[in-house]
Amino acid sequence: MFRRTRRLAVISALAATAVILSACTGSAPEVVQTSGGEPDPDATLTVGLVLEPTNLDIRHTSGAALEQILVDNIYEGLVTRTQENEIEPRLASDYEVSEDGLTYTFTLNEGVTFHDGAALTSADVVSSYDAVRTDDTLQGFAEFAGVASVEAPDESTVVMTLTEPNQNFLFSLTGPAGLVFQSGDDTDLQSAENGTGPFTLQNWSKGSTITFDRYADYWGEPAGVAEVVFEYIPDFTAGVNAALDGSLDVLTAVDPNLTPQLEDSGEFVLTKGRTTDKATLAFNNAKAPLDDVRVREALRLGIDHEALIEAVGAGEPLYGPIPELDPGYEDLSEVAPYDPARAKELLAEAGHEDLDLTLTIPSFYGTTVPQVLVSDFSKIGVTLEVDSVEFPTWLEDVYTNKDYELSFVLHVEPRDFGNFANPDYYFNYDNPEVQSLYAEALAEIDPDASADLLAEAARLVSEDHAADWLYTGQTITAVRPIVTGFPQDSINSRINLAGVTVAAE
Protein backbone atom coordinates (compact mmCIF):
# COMPACT_ATOMS: atom_id res chain seq x y z
CA MET A 1 0.00 0.00 0.00
CA PHE A 2 1.07 3.58 -0.55
CA ARG A 3 1.29 5.52 2.73
CA ARG A 4 1.30 9.25 3.29
CA THR A 5 1.82 10.40 6.87
CA ARG A 6 3.18 13.23 9.01
CA ARG A 7 5.21 12.41 12.13
CA LEU A 8 5.75 14.54 15.23
CA ALA A 9 8.45 17.13 14.73
CA VAL A 10 9.80 20.18 16.49
CA ILE A 11 9.27 23.54 14.84
CA SER A 12 12.57 25.35 14.70
CA ALA A 13 12.55 29.13 14.80
CA LEU A 14 15.65 29.06 12.63
CA ALA A 15 13.93 27.20 9.80
CA ALA A 16 12.85 30.30 7.93
CA THR A 17 12.62 28.56 4.59
CA ALA A 18 10.47 25.63 5.66
CA VAL A 19 7.61 24.95 8.02
CA ILE A 20 7.69 21.53 9.71
CA LEU A 21 4.31 20.40 10.98
CA SER A 22 3.32 17.67 13.41
CA ALA A 23 0.72 15.03 12.77
CA CYS A 24 -1.56 16.54 15.39
CA THR A 25 -1.71 20.08 14.02
CA GLY A 26 -3.36 21.81 11.09
CA SER A 27 -1.07 22.95 8.29
CA ALA A 28 -0.04 26.53 7.68
CA PRO A 29 1.38 28.21 4.57
CA GLU A 30 5.07 28.82 4.07
CA VAL A 31 6.34 32.06 5.55
CA VAL A 32 7.03 34.63 2.82
CA GLN A 33 7.56 37.81 4.84
CA THR A 34 9.43 38.49 8.05
CA SER A 35 8.14 41.17 10.40
CA GLY A 36 10.32 43.55 12.33
CA GLY A 37 8.66 42.82 15.68
CA GLU A 38 7.16 40.17 17.90
CA PRO A 39 3.79 38.77 16.77
CA ASP A 40 0.80 40.20 18.63
CA PRO A 41 -1.54 37.29 19.48
CA ASP A 42 -4.41 39.76 19.96
CA ALA A 43 -3.94 41.41 16.57
CA THR A 44 -6.55 41.92 13.87
CA LEU A 45 -5.55 41.17 10.27
CA THR A 46 -7.45 43.19 7.66
CA VAL A 47 -7.39 41.76 4.13
CA GLY A 48 -8.73 43.45 1.01
CA LEU A 49 -10.49 41.10 -1.42
CA VAL A 50 -12.35 41.72 -4.67
CA LEU A 51 -15.04 39.07 -4.96
CA GLU A 52 -17.63 38.76 -2.18
CA PRO A 53 -19.65 35.51 -1.98
CA THR A 54 -23.39 35.64 -2.56
CA ASN A 55 -23.92 33.33 0.43
CA LEU A 56 -21.77 31.15 2.71
CA ASP A 57 -23.20 27.75 1.79
CA ILE A 58 -20.13 26.11 0.32
CA ARG A 59 -22.00 22.80 0.14
CA HIS A 60 -24.49 24.08 -2.41
CA THR A 61 -22.74 27.09 -4.00
CA SER A 62 -19.77 27.00 -6.34
CA GLY A 63 -17.16 29.68 -6.83
CA ALA A 64 -13.72 30.74 -5.71
CA ALA A 65 -15.12 33.50 -3.47
CA LEU A 66 -16.25 30.82 -1.00
CA GLU A 67 -13.28 28.48 -1.25
CA GLN A 68 -10.84 31.37 -0.96
CA ILE A 69 -11.88 32.21 2.60
CA LEU A 70 -13.75 29.18 3.98
CA VAL A 71 -11.59 26.16 3.10
CA ASP A 72 -8.90 25.49 5.75
CA ASN A 73 -10.02 28.53 7.75
CA ILE A 74 -13.61 27.60 8.68
CA TYR A 75 -14.04 24.14 7.17
CA GLU A 76 -11.55 21.32 6.78
CA GLY A 77 -11.35 18.04 4.91
CA LEU A 78 -9.45 14.84 5.53
CA VAL A 79 -6.71 16.21 3.28
CA THR A 80 -5.80 19.62 1.96
CA ARG A 81 -3.36 21.07 -0.54
CA THR A 82 -0.38 23.38 -0.23
CA GLN A 83 0.24 26.53 -2.23
CA GLU A 84 2.15 24.29 -4.66
CA ASN A 85 -0.96 22.09 -5.05
CA GLU A 86 0.66 19.18 -3.23
CA ILE A 87 -1.69 17.02 -1.17
CA GLU A 88 -1.16 16.68 2.57
CA PRO A 89 -3.20 15.33 5.52
CA ARG A 90 -5.48 17.65 7.48
CA LEU A 91 -8.25 16.13 9.62
CA ALA A 92 -6.62 12.81 8.81
CA SER A 93 -3.32 12.16 10.57
CA ASP A 94 -2.38 9.79 7.76
CA TYR A 95 -3.91 7.83 4.90
CA GLU A 96 -3.22 4.77 2.78
CA VAL A 97 -4.12 4.01 -0.84
CA SER A 98 -4.30 0.39 -1.98
CA GLU A 99 -2.10 -0.82 -4.82
CA ASP A 100 -5.09 -1.11 -7.16
CA GLY A 101 -6.11 2.49 -6.44
CA LEU A 102 -9.58 1.50 -5.21
CA THR A 103 -9.40 1.72 -1.42
CA TYR A 104 -8.51 4.80 0.63
CA THR A 105 -8.09 4.40 4.39
CA PHE A 106 -7.91 7.51 6.59
CA THR A 107 -7.02 7.77 10.27
CA LEU A 108 -8.48 10.82 12.02
CA ASN A 109 -6.55 13.17 14.25
CA GLU A 110 -7.55 13.13 17.92
CA GLY A 111 -9.25 15.99 19.74
CA VAL A 112 -10.97 17.59 16.77
CA THR A 113 -14.17 19.47 17.62
CA PHE A 114 -16.74 21.39 15.66
CA HIS A 115 -17.26 25.02 16.55
CA ASP A 116 -20.34 24.12 18.60
CA GLY A 117 -18.09 21.95 20.79
CA ALA A 118 -19.17 18.51 19.51
CA ALA A 119 -16.36 16.02 18.91
CA LEU A 120 -15.58 14.96 15.36
CA THR A 121 -15.92 11.22 14.72
CA SER A 122 -15.71 9.04 11.66
CA ALA A 123 -19.52 9.05 11.56
CA ASP A 124 -19.44 12.73 10.63
CA VAL A 125 -17.11 11.97 7.73
CA VAL A 126 -19.31 9.12 6.53
CA SER A 127 -22.42 11.32 6.76
CA SER A 128 -20.73 14.18 4.89
CA TYR A 129 -19.37 12.01 2.09
CA ASP A 130 -22.46 9.86 1.72
CA ALA A 131 -24.43 13.07 1.22
CA VAL A 132 -22.03 14.24 -1.50
CA ARG A 133 -22.21 10.97 -3.40
CA THR A 134 -26.02 10.69 -3.24
CA ASP A 135 -27.28 14.30 -3.43
CA ASP A 136 -26.81 15.92 -6.82
CA THR A 137 -27.41 19.38 -5.34
CA LEU A 138 -24.17 19.23 -3.35
CA GLN A 139 -20.81 20.48 -4.61
CA GLY A 140 -18.64 17.50 -5.53
CA PHE A 141 -21.48 15.16 -6.53
CA ALA A 142 -19.91 14.53 -9.94
CA GLU A 143 -16.47 13.99 -8.37
CA PHE A 144 -17.93 11.32 -6.08
CA ALA A 145 -19.68 9.45 -8.90
CA GLY A 146 -17.15 6.61 -8.60
CA VAL A 147 -17.42 6.21 -4.83
CA ALA A 148 -18.95 2.80 -4.08
CA SER A 149 -18.99 3.11 -0.30
CA VAL A 150 -17.87 5.18 2.68
CA GLU A 151 -17.50 3.19 5.90
CA ALA A 152 -16.31 3.71 9.47
CA PRO A 153 -14.86 0.55 11.01
CA ASP A 154 -14.28 2.53 14.22
CA GLU A 155 -14.57 6.11 15.51
CA SER A 156 -11.21 7.19 14.13
CA THR A 157 -11.05 5.35 10.80
CA VAL A 158 -12.76 6.02 7.47
CA VAL A 159 -12.55 3.69 4.48
CA MET A 160 -13.61 4.88 1.04
CA THR A 161 -13.94 2.39 -1.81
CA LEU A 162 -14.09 3.38 -5.46
CA THR A 163 -15.66 1.47 -8.33
CA GLU A 164 -12.62 2.24 -10.48
CA PRO A 165 -9.31 4.06 -10.03
CA ASN A 166 -9.47 7.86 -10.16
CA GLN A 167 -6.21 9.76 -10.50
CA ASN A 168 -7.91 12.97 -9.36
CA PHE A 169 -9.90 11.57 -6.46
CA LEU A 170 -7.55 12.43 -3.61
CA PHE A 171 -7.09 15.90 -5.07
CA SER A 172 -10.87 16.34 -5.24
CA LEU A 173 -10.98 15.74 -1.49
CA THR A 174 -8.96 18.95 -1.02
CA GLY A 175 -11.92 20.96 -2.32
CA PRO A 176 -15.56 21.43 -1.29
CA ALA A 177 -16.35 17.76 -1.97
CA GLY A 178 -14.00 16.68 0.81
CA LEU A 179 -15.12 19.07 3.55
CA VAL A 180 -16.48 17.48 6.71
CA PHE A 181 -19.71 18.66 8.33
CA GLN A 182 -21.39 17.56 11.54
CA SER A 183 -23.89 14.75 11.10
CA GLY A 184 -27.47 15.92 11.66
CA ASP A 185 -26.45 19.56 12.08
CA ASP A 186 -29.22 22.08 11.29
CA THR A 187 -26.99 25.16 10.96
CA ASP A 188 -28.20 27.54 8.25
CA LEU A 189 -25.10 27.46 6.07
CA GLN A 190 -26.31 30.37 3.98
CA SER A 191 -25.33 32.78 6.73
CA ALA A 192 -23.74 30.72 9.53
CA GLU A 193 -21.23 27.89 9.95
CA ASN A 194 -20.18 24.99 12.15
CA GLY A 195 -16.79 23.86 10.91
CA THR A 196 -13.67 22.47 12.55
CA GLY A 197 -11.17 25.08 11.34
CA PRO A 198 -8.94 27.52 13.24
CA PHE A 199 -11.42 30.37 12.78
CA THR A 200 -15.12 30.91 13.46
CA LEU A 201 -17.50 33.30 11.72
CA GLN A 202 -18.10 36.42 13.82
CA ASN A 203 -20.09 38.59 11.44
CA TRP A 204 -21.01 39.16 7.81
CA SER A 205 -21.93 42.70 6.86
CA LYS A 206 -23.14 42.06 3.34
CA GLY A 207 -21.63 44.33 0.74
CA SER A 208 -18.83 45.27 3.07
CA THR A 209 -16.99 42.83 5.36
CA ILE A 210 -16.77 39.29 6.66
CA THR A 211 -15.11 38.85 10.06
CA PHE A 212 -13.54 35.71 11.53
CA ASP A 213 -12.49 35.08 15.13
CA ARG A 214 -9.82 32.68 16.33
CA TYR A 215 -11.38 29.39 17.49
CA ALA A 216 -10.04 28.98 21.03
CA ASP A 217 -10.54 25.20 21.11
CA TYR A 218 -8.99 24.44 17.74
CA TRP A 219 -7.45 20.97 17.64
CA GLY A 220 -4.19 22.12 16.07
CA GLU A 221 -1.89 25.08 16.48
CA PRO A 222 -3.98 28.16 17.32
CA ALA A 223 -4.35 30.83 14.67
CA GLY A 224 -1.69 33.52 14.79
CA VAL A 225 -4.17 36.42 14.96
CA ALA A 226 -7.27 36.91 17.09
CA GLU A 227 -9.40 38.29 14.28
CA VAL A 228 -9.48 38.51 10.50
CA VAL A 229 -11.53 41.12 8.67
CA PHE A 230 -12.10 40.65 4.94
CA GLU A 231 -12.88 43.98 3.29
CA TYR A 232 -14.63 43.52 -0.06
CA ILE A 233 -13.56 46.23 -2.49
CA PRO A 234 -14.51 45.34 -6.09
CA ASP A 235 -12.92 48.48 -7.57
CA PHE A 236 -9.15 48.09 -7.96
CA THR A 237 -8.38 51.78 -7.51
CA ALA A 238 -10.52 51.95 -4.40
CA GLY A 239 -8.61 48.95 -3.05
CA VAL A 240 -5.28 50.72 -3.48
CA ASN A 241 -6.69 53.85 -1.86
CA ALA A 242 -7.91 51.80 1.11
CA ALA A 243 -4.45 50.28 1.48
CA LEU A 244 -2.73 53.65 1.31
CA ASP A 245 -5.03 55.24 3.89
CA GLY A 246 -4.13 52.54 6.42
CA SER A 247 -7.38 50.58 6.27
CA LEU A 248 -5.75 47.34 5.10
CA ASP A 249 -2.85 45.16 6.19
CA VAL A 250 -2.99 43.13 2.96
CA LEU A 251 -4.44 43.92 -0.46
CA THR A 252 -4.91 40.98 -2.81
CA ALA A 253 -5.45 41.07 -6.58
CA VAL A 254 -3.52 44.31 -7.03
CA ASP A 255 -3.94 45.75 -10.52
CA PRO A 256 -0.41 45.68 -12.05
CA ASN A 257 -0.95 49.19 -13.42
CA LEU A 258 -1.47 50.49 -9.88
CA THR A 259 1.55 48.85 -8.24
CA PRO A 260 3.78 51.96 -8.45
CA GLN A 261 1.50 53.77 -6.00
CA LEU A 262 1.97 51.02 -3.43
CA GLU A 263 5.69 50.62 -4.07
CA ASP A 264 6.34 54.34 -3.84
CA SER A 265 4.50 54.59 -0.54
CA GLY A 266 7.11 52.46 1.23
CA GLU A 267 4.30 50.95 3.34
CA PHE A 268 3.98 47.64 1.55
CA VAL A 269 5.97 44.69 0.26
CA LEU A 270 4.68 43.44 -3.11
CA THR A 271 4.79 39.73 -3.92
CA LYS A 272 4.06 37.96 -7.20
CA GLY A 273 2.42 34.59 -6.92
CA ARG A 274 2.07 31.66 -9.26
CA THR A 275 -1.42 30.47 -10.05
CA THR A 276 -3.44 28.04 -12.11
CA ASP A 277 -5.73 30.96 -13.02
CA LYS A 278 -6.75 30.58 -16.62
CA ALA A 279 -7.91 33.88 -18.12
CA THR A 280 -10.49 32.25 -20.32
CA LEU A 281 -12.29 33.78 -23.27
CA ALA A 282 -15.22 31.40 -23.34
CA PHE A 283 -17.02 30.61 -26.58
CA ASN A 284 -20.59 29.33 -26.53
CA ASN A 285 -19.82 26.36 -28.76
CA ALA A 286 -23.51 25.55 -29.29
CA LYS A 287 -24.61 29.02 -30.39
CA ALA A 288 -24.21 30.37 -33.92
CA PRO A 289 -21.86 31.61 -35.20
CA LEU A 290 -19.60 30.18 -32.46
CA ASP A 291 -20.74 26.68 -33.39
CA ASP A 292 -18.50 27.04 -36.49
CA VAL A 293 -14.91 26.04 -35.69
CA ARG A 294 -13.66 28.46 -38.36
CA VAL A 295 -15.16 31.39 -36.47
CA ARG A 296 -13.68 30.24 -33.18
CA GLU A 297 -10.24 29.76 -34.76
CA ALA A 298 -10.43 33.16 -36.41
CA LEU A 299 -11.13 34.85 -33.11
CA ARG A 300 -8.15 33.13 -31.51
CA LEU A 301 -5.83 34.03 -34.40
CA GLY A 302 -6.98 37.63 -34.17
CA ILE A 303 -5.79 38.11 -30.57
CA ASP A 304 -2.29 39.46 -29.94
CA HIS A 305 -1.69 37.57 -26.70
CA GLU A 306 1.71 39.08 -25.96
CA ALA A 307 0.36 42.61 -26.34
CA LEU A 308 -2.63 41.73 -24.17
CA ILE A 309 -0.40 40.45 -21.37
CA GLU A 310 1.69 43.60 -21.62
CA ALA A 311 -1.48 45.67 -21.28
CA VAL A 312 -2.68 43.62 -18.31
CA GLY A 313 0.73 43.99 -16.69
CA ALA A 314 1.17 40.44 -15.38
CA GLY A 315 0.74 36.90 -16.60
CA GLU A 316 2.20 34.20 -18.81
CA PRO A 317 1.01 33.06 -22.26
CA LEU A 318 -1.37 30.08 -22.31
CA TYR A 319 -2.72 28.50 -25.48
CA GLY A 320 -4.50 25.49 -24.04
CA PRO A 321 -6.79 24.46 -21.17
CA ILE A 322 -4.06 23.11 -18.83
CA PRO A 323 -1.74 25.57 -17.05
CA GLU A 324 1.90 24.83 -16.33
CA LEU A 325 1.35 23.88 -12.67
CA ASP A 326 -1.15 21.14 -13.56
CA PRO A 327 -0.54 17.61 -14.87
CA GLY A 328 -0.76 17.39 -18.66
CA TYR A 329 0.60 20.83 -19.51
CA GLU A 330 2.07 21.27 -23.00
CA ASP A 331 3.10 24.42 -24.84
CA LEU A 332 0.40 24.74 -27.52
CA SER A 333 1.36 28.15 -28.85
CA GLU A 334 1.68 26.81 -32.38
CA VAL A 335 -2.04 25.95 -32.46
CA ALA A 336 -3.22 29.56 -32.52
CA PRO A 337 -0.41 32.05 -33.23
CA TYR A 338 -1.25 35.68 -33.85
CA ASP A 339 -2.28 35.84 -37.52
CA PRO A 340 -4.97 38.43 -38.30
CA ALA A 341 -4.67 37.88 -42.05
CA ARG A 342 -5.53 34.19 -41.68
CA ALA A 343 -8.30 35.15 -39.25
CA LYS A 344 -9.93 37.30 -41.95
CA GLU A 345 -9.69 34.44 -44.44
CA LEU A 346 -11.41 32.04 -42.06
CA LEU A 347 -14.22 34.48 -41.36
CA ALA A 348 -14.72 34.98 -45.09
CA GLU A 349 -14.86 31.21 -45.62
CA ALA A 350 -17.48 30.99 -42.88
CA GLY A 351 -19.51 33.81 -44.46
CA HIS A 352 -18.90 36.28 -41.63
CA GLU A 353 -16.72 39.04 -43.02
CA ASP A 354 -18.68 41.54 -40.90
CA LEU A 355 -19.57 40.01 -37.57
CA ASP A 356 -21.16 41.45 -34.44
CA LEU A 357 -20.57 39.65 -31.14
CA THR A 358 -21.20 40.41 -27.48
CA LEU A 359 -18.73 39.81 -24.66
CA THR A 360 -20.34 39.32 -21.25
CA ILE A 361 -17.84 40.03 -18.47
CA PRO A 362 -18.12 40.48 -14.69
CA SER A 363 -17.63 44.17 -13.97
CA PHE A 364 -14.89 43.70 -11.37
CA TYR A 365 -12.44 42.58 -14.07
CA GLY A 366 -12.14 46.15 -15.28
CA THR A 367 -11.76 47.40 -18.83
CA THR A 368 -8.24 46.43 -19.95
CA VAL A 369 -9.02 43.00 -21.41
CA PRO A 370 -12.24 44.13 -23.14
CA GLN A 371 -10.50 47.15 -24.66
CA VAL A 372 -7.72 44.98 -26.12
CA LEU A 373 -10.22 42.47 -27.50
CA VAL A 374 -12.37 45.21 -29.03
CA SER A 375 -9.29 46.64 -30.75
CA ASP A 376 -7.91 43.29 -31.93
CA PHE A 377 -11.25 42.04 -33.22
CA SER A 378 -11.95 45.26 -35.10
CA LYS A 379 -8.84 44.55 -37.18
CA ILE A 380 -10.36 41.29 -38.45
CA GLY A 381 -13.84 42.69 -39.13
CA VAL A 382 -15.50 41.74 -35.85
CA THR A 383 -17.40 44.35 -33.87
CA LEU A 384 -17.36 43.45 -30.20
CA GLU A 385 -19.96 44.86 -27.84
CA VAL A 386 -19.00 44.63 -24.17
CA ASP A 387 -21.70 43.86 -21.61
CA SER A 388 -20.22 44.49 -18.14
CA VAL A 389 -22.44 42.90 -15.48
CA GLU A 390 -22.45 42.26 -11.75
CA PHE A 391 -21.10 38.84 -10.80
CA PRO A 392 -24.47 37.39 -9.63
CA THR A 393 -25.87 38.33 -13.05
CA TRP A 394 -22.94 36.61 -14.75
CA LEU A 395 -23.56 33.47 -12.69
CA GLU A 396 -27.23 33.45 -13.62
CA ASP A 397 -27.02 34.36 -17.31
CA VAL A 398 -23.71 32.84 -18.42
CA TYR A 399 -22.79 30.07 -15.99
CA THR A 400 -26.28 28.74 -15.28
CA ASN A 401 -28.44 29.60 -18.28
CA LYS A 402 -25.63 29.62 -20.89
CA ASP A 403 -27.20 32.71 -22.43
CA TYR A 404 -24.16 34.37 -24.00
CA GLU A 405 -21.87 34.46 -27.03
CA LEU A 406 -18.43 35.29 -25.60
CA SER A 407 -17.49 35.64 -21.97
CA PHE A 408 -14.38 36.31 -19.95
CA VAL A 409 -13.62 34.95 -16.50
CA LEU A 410 -10.63 33.72 -14.54
CA HIS A 411 -11.01 29.99 -13.94
CA VAL A 412 -8.86 29.69 -10.84
CA GLU A 413 -9.30 26.08 -9.77
CA PRO A 414 -6.39 23.68 -10.41
CA ARG A 415 -6.93 20.44 -12.33
CA ASP A 416 -10.24 21.57 -13.78
CA PHE A 417 -9.68 20.24 -17.30
CA GLY A 418 -12.75 18.08 -16.72
CA ASN A 419 -14.88 21.13 -17.57
CA PHE A 420 -14.03 20.52 -21.22
CA ALA A 421 -15.01 16.87 -20.87
CA ASN A 422 -18.43 17.90 -19.56
CA PRO A 423 -20.84 18.76 -22.41
CA ASP A 424 -23.24 20.32 -19.88
CA TYR A 425 -20.72 22.90 -18.69
CA TYR A 426 -21.38 26.46 -19.78
CA PHE A 427 -18.87 26.18 -22.65
CA ASN A 428 -21.34 23.83 -24.41
CA TYR A 429 -18.34 21.93 -25.79
CA ASP A 430 -19.07 18.32 -26.67
CA ASN A 431 -16.26 16.10 -28.00
CA PRO A 432 -16.62 12.36 -27.28
CA GLU A 433 -12.92 11.72 -27.97
CA VAL A 434 -11.91 14.31 -25.36
CA GLN A 435 -14.37 12.79 -22.91
CA SER A 436 -12.93 9.31 -23.53
CA LEU A 437 -9.33 10.45 -23.10
CA TYR A 438 -10.19 12.27 -19.89
CA ALA A 439 -11.90 9.16 -18.53
CA GLU A 440 -8.79 7.12 -19.39
CA ALA A 441 -6.57 9.68 -17.67
CA LEU A 442 -8.60 9.47 -14.48
CA ALA A 443 -8.58 5.67 -14.48
CA GLU A 444 -4.81 5.49 -15.07
CA ILE A 445 -3.00 4.69 -11.81
CA ASP A 446 0.41 5.82 -13.07
CA PRO A 447 0.50 9.63 -12.74
CA ASP A 448 2.91 10.12 -15.66
CA ALA A 449 0.79 8.05 -18.01
CA SER A 450 -2.28 9.92 -16.81
CA ALA A 451 -0.59 13.25 -17.56
CA ASP A 452 0.23 12.08 -21.10
CA LEU A 453 -3.45 11.28 -21.72
CA LEU A 454 -4.46 14.68 -20.37
CA ALA A 455 -1.97 16.38 -22.69
CA GLU A 456 -3.43 14.52 -25.67
CA ALA A 457 -6.95 15.57 -24.71
CA ALA A 458 -5.90 19.17 -24.10
CA ARG A 459 -4.35 19.39 -27.56
CA LEU A 460 -7.64 18.26 -29.10
CA VAL A 461 -9.54 20.90 -27.13
CA SER A 462 -7.15 23.61 -28.30
CA GLU A 463 -7.27 22.39 -31.92
CA ASP A 464 -11.07 22.50 -31.69
CA HIS A 465 -10.69 26.09 -30.50
CA ALA A 466 -13.24 25.38 -27.79
CA ALA A 467 -12.17 28.61 -26.05
CA ASP A 468 -9.22 30.94 -25.97
CA TRP A 469 -6.84 31.03 -23.03
CA LEU A 470 -5.60 34.58 -22.97
CA TYR A 471 -2.98 34.04 -20.26
CA THR A 472 -2.17 32.33 -16.99
CA GLY A 473 -2.80 34.78 -14.19
CA GLN A 474 -0.19 36.02 -11.80
CA THR A 475 -1.33 37.42 -8.48
CA ILE A 476 0.19 40.56 -7.02
CA THR A 477 -0.32 41.01 -3.29
CA ALA A 478 0.58 44.05 -1.22
CA VAL A 479 1.54 43.16 2.37
CA ARG A 480 2.51 45.47 5.21
CA PRO A 481 5.93 44.53 6.65
CA ILE A 482 4.38 43.82 10.07
CA VAL A 483 2.52 40.85 8.52
CA THR A 484 4.32 37.51 8.40
CA GLY A 485 3.26 34.28 6.72
CA PHE A 486 0.64 35.55 4.29
CA PRO A 487 0.35 33.05 1.41
CA GLN A 488 1.88 34.06 -1.91
CA ASP A 489 0.87 31.43 -4.48
CA SER A 490 -2.57 30.19 -5.56
CA ILE A 491 -4.38 32.70 -3.34
CA ASN A 492 -7.19 33.27 -5.83
CA SER A 493 -8.45 29.82 -4.90
CA ARG A 494 -7.23 29.34 -1.33
CA ILE A 495 -5.98 31.63 1.45
CA ASN A 496 -4.90 29.59 4.47
CA LEU A 497 -4.57 32.17 7.26
CA ALA A 498 -3.78 29.88 10.19
CA GLY A 499 -0.08 30.72 10.24
CA VAL A 500 -0.31 34.45 9.55
CA THR A 501 0.85 36.81 12.30
CA VAL A 502 0.83 40.57 12.77
CA ALA A 503 3.55 42.29 14.78
CA ALA A 504 2.79 44.88 17.38
CA GLU A 505 3.47 48.35 16.00
Image: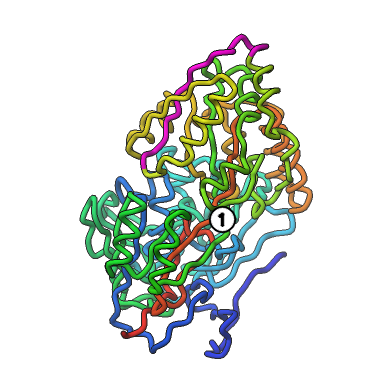
Q: Is residue 180 visible?
A: no
Tell me if residue 233 comes above or below residue 479 in the rendering.
above
Callout 1: few (<14), some (14-19), or many (20+) C-alpha neighbours within 10 Å? Answer: many
Tell me if residue 377 comes above or below residue 23 in the rendering.
above
Q: Quadrant of residue 47?
A: bottom left
Tell me if residue 348 comes above or below residue 505 in the rendering.
above
Q: Is residue 159 magenta?
A: no
Query: Quadrant location of the C terminus?
Result: bottom left
Q: Residue at x 52, y 25 (%)?
A: 284
Residue 460 percent location from the top left of the image: 72, 32
Judged left or right of residue 213, residue 502 is right
Task: Report the magenta residues as a range.
Answer: 348-363
Depth order, front residue of 120/342? 342
Depth order, front residue of 321/167? 321
Q: Which residue was labeled with disc 1?
A: 275
Depth order, front residue of 287/78? 287
Q: Quadrant of residue 49?
A: bottom left
Residue 380 percent location from the top left of the image: 59, 22
Residue 478 percent location from the top left of the image: 43, 66
Q: Is residue 458 visible?
A: yes
